[in-house]
Amino acid sequence: MKELQLSEAKRSCESIIEAVGAVFVGNKPLLRKLLAAGLANGHVLFEDNPGLGKTLLAKVFARVIGFNYARIQFTPDLLPADIIGTRVWRQKDSTFELMYGPIFTNILLADEINRTPPKTQAALLEAMEERQVTIEGETHALAAPFFVLATQNPIEQEGTYPLPEAQLDRFVMKLSTGYASSVEEESLILKRRIAWHKDDPSEEVQPVLEIAQFLNLQNTVENDIYIDQSILDYVSKIIRETRGHPQVQIGSSPRGGLALLKLSRAMALINGRDFVIPDDIKVFVHDALAHRIILNLEETLEGVSPGNIISEIVESIPSPTEFYPR
């Protein structure tokens, strides 16, 4: 890949991060990870306490990269047809008309996804994996690209429905926005709210790229970022170790390794490289694998977390010291 193309791609990535950061007050690593997921065309689950800007971040990111997006507020009475669509009888013409649901978009903002029953959550399974939906036996392809940015609140259990493991596994990452890290950041949030004169400024956000430009970045990640065999072996060792760890009941699926592969290549491009280094893997290993690991019950009761296990595994496996960029 030519150096000029790399520098242009890096500038485009930096402009996206700066535009999102101009609205959302948060750490740059979080924004870089979200951008990496977008470049990898992967779904992201935001899990954190209320009021930390999860929905705002998802909406601002969708507008900055210029794609069509739709937002669904998940509620207990939401039906699958409310997401994917259904056929409606038109008495005037004596025909059924297909009414497309909000899932027919580029970016779907699934707000508080754990507040809807499993039957409705399952309506997203086919779309998230195969980028298509089936309505009354007929298959319909979704627009390309398509990815889901979902949010959920972990502290309220009443009236919620935990996501099944099969659906969690379809998210390339599980992220947390977190609280402001300093008094200065907390004050900046208040200052920007005064300047906006509204709680949601996302409608005024303008795209910094055209759709074709972002698609080109996604294509570059998929086809032009080299990853050495030694790093592929490194990822494979991490994934396999999660399955053989004595404190783990169910380890990461192969999809976890694919997630690390996609995200690391995207991060390489964000950093202006056309090859992956071990640090590109390490920066995502917790976000991409923690939600795919189920611990033994006794370990959970003793306060052990998947993050503890992943840290132990990464420390026990030596990073590749020789990898050869093209």
Image (cartoon, grey):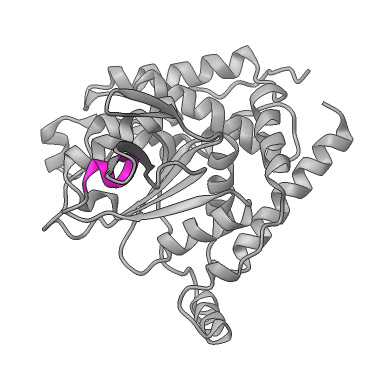
- Tell me residue 297's x, y (percent): 12, 34
User: Where is residue 255, by image quadrant?
Assistant: top left
Relative depth, front residue between 220 and 190: 220
Above/below status of 94 relative to 183: above
Q: Quadrant of the C terminus?
A: top right
Relative depth, front residue between 211 and 101: 101
Determine the residue positioned at 51% across, 82% down: 193
Q: Quadrant of the N terminus?
A: top right
Q: Which residues are magenta?
A: 79-87
Side (left or right) of 9 relative to 131: right
Determine the residue positioned at 49% across, 44% down: 105
- Tell me residue 165's x, y (percent): 24, 32
Relative depth, front residue between 116 and 252: 116
- Tell me residue 55's x, y (percent): 42, 61
Side (left or right) of 221 relative to 147: right
Determine the residue positioned at 55% across, 84% down: 191
- Tell me residue 32's x, y (percent): 59, 49
Determine the residue positioned at 34% across, 21% down: 253
Residue 49 appears in the picture as rendered: yes
Q: Is residue 82 magenta?
A: yes
Above/below status of 97 relative to 34: above
Residue 271 appears in the picture as rendered: no
Side (left or right) of 181 relative to 210: left
Q: Is residue 297 magenta?
A: no
